[in-house]
Amino acid sequence: MNGQISPWIGAAAFTFVVAVAPTAVAVAQEYPSRLVTLVVPYPAGGGLDVFARMLAKPLAERLGKSVVVDNRPGGGTTIGASYVANAAPDGYTIMLGTSTPLAVAVSLQKKLSYDPLRDFVPVALVANAPFLLIVNPSLNVRSVSELVALAKNTPAKLSYGSGGPGSPQHLSMELLKSITGMELVHIHIPYKGDAPAITDLLAGHIPMQFAETTPALPLITSG
């Protein structure tokens, strides 16, 4: 969408993190000596999943051992994060994390089964990815300004989907609402990732959402 307000309003940082040992490893050994599991706290088909699979092959070549992607969605990314936090702290279970499990969840949820500062060690920041504001073509809007005008003419009737309260998609849309004064209804049934949300958007079940570039861009270029 084109308009005075950039649709690239949010961005996700992708970071490798690994469970940390409470004490030093007693026996030093060459790493890695076996398969490495790369946990993605989102479902298959989403932008982070696609990116993880793009990374797995060169990472395996660099390490000299197989790297398998393990999707563990749910709980607003906290299920995957909890799994990695409770894994053996030996470097063989790593997570491609975002700000959601590592920062947002901590701020919005009273109880988590992990502490990002205590239970993880950051390995590398591997990418930053923007979010795109996308709408179903049935809305018949071609810019952010047209979307804002439509929303203001039909207050509290347009809705949007997200990964649930506190997800980057939710916070990005709430930021856009605060900037523009739009009234939108947040669908509180959380999607486990961009892929199922985009499927519902294409089917007309939700009119708009913020989504990662990878799953959204091919649909935008195809109309």
Image (cartoon, grey):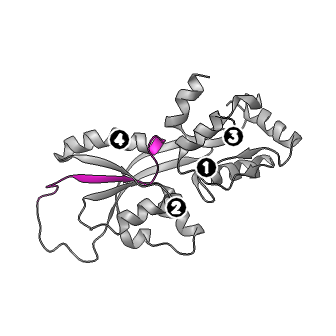
Q: Which numbered disc flags the more N-terminal residue, 1 or 2?
A: 2
Q: Please name which of the two marks, 1 or 3, marks the residue nearer to the observer.
A: 3
Task: Please state, as top left, top right, bottom left or bottom right, where the C terminus lies in the image.
Answer: top right
Query: Label 2: how many residues lie within 10 Å, few (<14), some (14-19) or many (20+)?
Result: some
Residues at marks 1 and 3, CA–CA distance in whole angstroms: 17 Å
Where is mark 3, residue-wise?
A: 205
Q: CA distance from mark 3 to mark 2?
A: 22 Å
Left or right? Give the position of 182 relative to 133: right
Q: Which residues are magenta?
A: 30-48
Q: How far separated are the C-alphas under marks 4 and 2?
A: 22 Å
Q: x and y percent of residue 10 in the render? A: 59, 47
Q: Secondary structure at mark 4?
A: helix
Residue situated in front as seen by the camera: 80 or 176: 80
Crowding near pointer 1: few (<14 within 10 Å), some, many (20+)?
many
User: Of callouts 4 and 2, which one flags the residue occurring earlier in the amino acid sequence?
Assistant: 4
Q: Quadrant of residue 29?
A: bottom left
Q: In the rendered image, which residue does mark 4 sit on?
A: 53
